[in-house]
Image (cartoon, grey):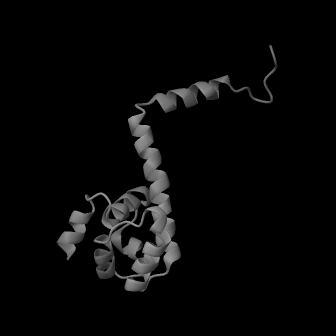
Amino acid sequence: MKRAAKRSTTEPGLLGQVFATYQTLEHCSLEALADELGCDEQTLQMLALCRKPAGEAFAEQVKVICERFGLAPRPLVNMLRQVDIMGGMETHAANDSGRSVARLQLAARDRKRKDEPTP
């Protein structure tokens, strides 16, 4: 089981990949992740093999997973949303090859402070 759960961290569409991304974002251990979800590490390994809830059936899929493993849905939903948001931002930043950073820096330079005199 442990080996399959480890492999799931590299498989797109599985909760294992979501958990690995979350651990990277939050700098947390497997034990901390299990505590956050309200389960033990063995249950976390089984969860890792589940498909990531997505699409219009998201709520129903979360409900089924949570009922199956005896979890409260809120921590799982919060984690999924955080990974979607932060993971998407990292992907966008990596794909943008620094152009966003350059635009942000230009925008920061163009902005005047309230205490600066007007020319």
Q: Is residue 112 left or right of residue 30?
A: right
User: Which residue is pictured at 43% across the width and 33% down the height?
Assistant: 96
Q: Is residue 99 left or right of residue 2?
A: right
* Above/below status of 82 relative to 33: above
The answer to whether any part of residue 36 appears in the image is no
Question: Observer-nearest residue: 117 or 105?
Answer: 105
Question: Observer-nearest residue: 48 or 57?
Answer: 57
Residue 43 in percent (x, y) is at 32, 81
The answer to whether any part of residue 20 appears in the image is yes
Residue 24 in percent (x, y) is at 38, 57
The N terminus, quarter of image: bottom left
User: Which residue is pictured at 44% across the width and 39% down the height?
Assistant: 93
The C terminus, quarter of image: top right
List the single residue furthest toward the front: 56
Question: Observer-nearest residue: 43 or 56?
Answer: 56
User: Looking at the rendering, which quadrant does residue 22 occupy?
Assistant: bottom left
User: Which residue is pictured at 36% across the width and 65% down the height?
Assistant: 19
User: Which residue is pictured at 43% across the width and 51% down the height?
Assistant: 87
Residue 12 in percent (x, y) is at 30, 57
Residue 50 in percent (x, y) is at 32, 72
Question: Observer-nearest residue: 77 or 115?
Answer: 77
